[in-house]
Amino acid sequence: MKNLFLAFLLIVSCKLQAQILFAGNHVFEAYLGIPNTARFSGGLNFITGEINDGEITKFRGLAPSGIRYTYMISEDISFGFDMIYNYSNVSRATTDTLYNGITGQWEYQQTSTQDITKRLRFHARLNFHLLTGSPQSDSYIGIGAGTNNRWITSIKDGEVKTFKGSDASILPISMRICYGYRYYFGYNWGITGEVGLGGPLVSFGVSYKM
């Protein structure tokens, strides 16, 4: 019985030492994600119906990044919101060889395409906080679900096609599952990182709690 009581005290002691966020805390975060998968996309574009062939000649973009708000319901569970935005502007050039029956010569024909995509997601988030063993860190598993808004402009040899709403998104909703870690240098300021699916594959940012 004495050993069980000592074990219980040890567990409680570890719990207290490992806690950095408490019920009622508000957490605000800004983060940048990597990578921007549009840089590596190929094959059929299911939205525009075009084949993503050709060499990428120019790329600009922002990988899934955004801001998060978290409210600690208890020491183990928190609820919040996540806004995720990403942008890509991809230019491609394709060169085809065509036979000219009039001149009897092979000629080169170049086709240029440009795809501009913007995506915005608002997620409601539920986080389950884990024991870390450090009084300055927080570790959690998060799940989220929400909107899936996308805007696409596709330009091929000067011809412009635009897609939005249900024409630009295969599914009207989006989801996320992730593992996150926070480390605080003091009471308020810290750094944060997440790995997950349905948003940034990896993200890093700053965290402020109050």
Image (cartoon, helix red, strand yellow):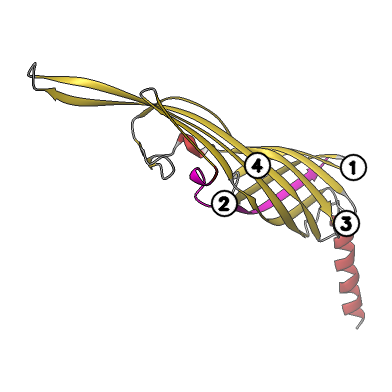
Disc 4 residue crowd, few under 14, some 14–19, many 20+, Cα 10 Å: many
Which residue in the protein does label 3 denote? Answer: 17
**Cα distance between the residues tagged 4 and 3:** 33 Å
Query: Dot 3: what SS?
Result: helix
Which residue in the protein does label 2 denote? Answer: 172
Which residue in the protein does label 1 denote? Answer: 187
For badge 4, the amino acid type reads: Ile
**Cα distance between the residues tagged 2 and 3:** 43 Å
Disc 3 residue crowd, few under 14, some 14–19, many 20+, Cα 10 Å: some
Q: Of the residues tagged 3 and 1, which is closer to the observer?
A: 1
**Cα distance between the residues tagged 1 and 4:** 27 Å
For badge 1, the amino acid type reads: Tyr
Q: Of the residues tagged 4 and 3, which is closer to the observer?
A: 4
In the image, residue 122 above or below residue 10: above
Which residue in the protein does label 4 denote? Answer: 84
User: In this orientation, which residue lies closer to the viewer: 58 or 15?
Assistant: 58
Query: Which residue is at 88% across, 73% downward?
Result: 8
